[in-house]
Image (cartoon, rainbow, N blue to C red):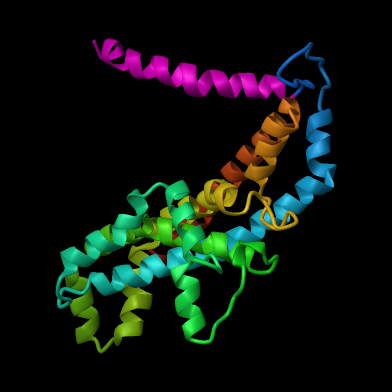
Amino acid sequence: MALAFLLPALVILGAFVVWPMISAFRLSFTNAAGFGVEEWVGVDNYVKVFTDPEVQDAVVNTLQYTVLFTPTAVLAALLLALVVNNPRLPWRSFFRTTLFLPFVVSLAVAAFAWSYLIDPQVGLLSYWLGRMGLHLGNVLEDPSLAMPAVALVAVWKNFGFYFVIFLAGLQDIPASLYEAARVDGAGVLHRFRHVTLPLLSNTFAFVLVFAMIAALQAFDQIYVMTGGGPYGHTQTIVMEIYESGFRKLELGFASALSYVLLIATLLLSVVQFVFFGRREEDLA
């Protein structure tokens, strides 16, 4: 009976997840181009992944995007969760809903909206900043500002989800621990350091891993806002996979690059969970 109920979901997962992964793994050892005869090339595609200058540039851009996006989104979410978790704050439900709303918006739609907001000709944000004496020009065409701009859009879109997770973690911390710390003379910073952070470590690890995975998979807003430009300064790994697979028709190379990214993401997640797990044991 259980298998009968699971069967529809298993068929969908097998057809749209498991089989494509197996097929992509097979393609990564060929010179597949979407048409013609496929030839077995062994590990040549994987060698190219680690030697191609364009891939190396994409890795650097992805790391830059990760550094810009991950700490900003996580710290903003944690700070706002601490504020909204205060029982003396009025309209808490309103703030919870308002801060979460951007997360339900499609990232592509958000990217279109932000593209118009920061447009130097018709953008309201550019107009307001100009009235305050801040003339940024065409941000998306500036090599030094394009990456922070697309990272900012991702922060605005995703921090609401991290905010809700942090808020749930904060509400699971017993109020009696804060009362005991307050009685012992602990101030706000000491309570945060010795009560909140240790008990929030699992939540923090989950949010950090989730944010870093989202950063490594950045694509939507970059594709919409810059297309990898200007001059390749926002060309991330996933953008490189898209370019290789769907524009250059190098499906074998794109599949190899996809698996390298998958393995890197898994290793990063394992390292972070092990680190936070040991830290929690030390605190216990």
Say whether residue 49 is left or right of residue 9.
right
Q: Is residue 20 left or right of residue 211?
A: right
Examine the structure image and report whether residue 259 is included in the region drawn in magenta. no
- Residue 47 location, x and y as percent? 83, 36
Relative to the observer, which residue lies in front, 10 or 274?
10
Q: Residue at x 35, y 83 (%)?
A: 189
Q: Quadrant of residue 63?
A: bottom right
Q: Is residue 118 left or right of residue 230?
A: left
Q: Which x, y percent locates residue 49?
A: 78, 39
Q: What residue is drawn where x is 33% and y is 64%?
A: 199
The answer to whether residue 244 is above or below residue 140 is above
Picture quadrant of residue 99? bottom left
Q: Residue at x 34, y 13 (%)?
A: 7
Magenta residues span 1-28
Instruction: Give yes or no for residue 10 being in the magenta stretch.
Output: yes
Dividing the image into 4 quarters, which one contains the C terminus? bottom left
Residue closest to the eye, 240 or 112: 112
- The structure residue drawn at horizontal position 34% and vertical position 61%, both measured from the top left corner, is 163
The picture quadrant where one finds residue 85 is bottom left
Magenta segment, prevailing SS (helix, strand or loop): helix
Q: In the image, residue 172 lies at what x, y percent?
A: 23, 60
